[in-house]
Image: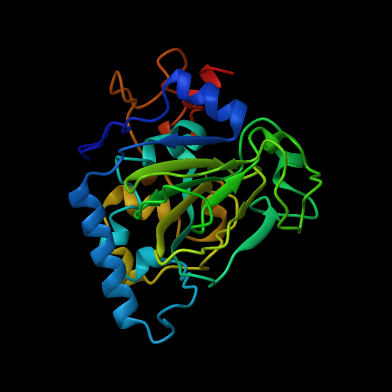
Amino acid sequence: MSDQTYRKAPPGFTKEQWEEFDREGFLVIENALTQDEIDYYLNAIDELTASDLTYTEGKFYGPQNVVTRHPVFAGLIDHPHHVGFGYDIYGELLKLHISQVFLRSRDSSHNAWHPDGARAVPYGVFSPILPMQIKIGYWLTDLPVARMGNFVCMPGSHRQQYFEGYRTHESMLDEKILCCKAGTMTIMHCGTWHRVEPNESDVVRKNIFLAYCPSWVCEADRVQCDSEWLETLNREQRIIMRSRHGYARTKPPKADFPLFLERETGADSDADFSPDIVPQHLRKRRVTVEQWI
């Protein structure tokens, strides 16, 4: 290992959380944020809307690539609250797929049933077991009841590529309407069929979403990052943004290894297979969920 200081992987799934996520396609973690953190992110959203000429009060607002637009959101790229969940699935090839802020006001918008990602040939065709993308959601406003712009999903639907309600906004038997407190974090499998309720309240629903994927899946909200902006990031953030040349998405340079050290032991490679003849950046490393499947 070089003299570079590496971080251990932050906490991710427990075995029980993974089993629930794998079964339901959705995981809810309450009290993930403190009130100070909620206020911190709400203030950053206020600063973002104040500086954005496209923002109109009372209208739906959903800018993308927000990590490049405010340093508070850039800090979420590798935030220890959630990045470990992505690392447990994608390991050394973890990449930020998209970053978004959503504001949903009364009557501003809702959407129909859909999965995330490709539609004509869904991700599940190529990856029927592991998600090709997961989406982290931070819920910054209390949503105690339905019809407040709530997220709605069909538990277990990530295993099916056809859905009766697709492109409709109809309620479906056994759907789950998310009613949650501010500070809740959710993790969604990209194949989970979901929709958004209309907002019939005077509360503006405010969210931050960050999706992660393998580095070789194309980015959703950018092509290349500004080089000067990349220099403002730490090592792990720069790696996770994956803004090198295209082939580096499949074969990252050796400087990008390890992204994180093993969280329990601090090892930089798999202890049972790390022959010296194989350079570190070419060694197979098991991701956490591989060990559980």
Q: As drawn, is 262 to the left or to the right of 34?
A: right
Residue beneath the point at 18% across and 51% down: 36
Q: Quadrant of the N terminus?
A: top left
* x, y percent for residue 258: 36, 36
Q: Residue furthest top?
A: 272
* x, y percent for residue 116: 64, 52
In this rendering, the count of numbered labels is: 0
Q: As drawn, is 80 to the left or to the right of 194?
A: left
Dividing the picture into quadrants, the one containing residue 51 is bottom left
| Residue 252 visible in this rendered orientation of the protein | no
Dividing the picture into quadrants, the one containing residue 208 is bottom left
Residue beneath the point at 28% across and 31% down: 8
Q: Considering only vertical position in the picture, is 202 above or below 133?
A: below
Q: Considering only vertical position in the picture, is 27 above or below 60?
A: above
Residue in the foreground of this view, choosing between 121 and 56: 56
Q: As drawn, is 250 to the left or to the right of 205?
A: right
Residue beneath the point at 36% across and 45% down: 181
* x, y percent for residue 275: 44, 19
* x, y percent for residue 30: 36, 36
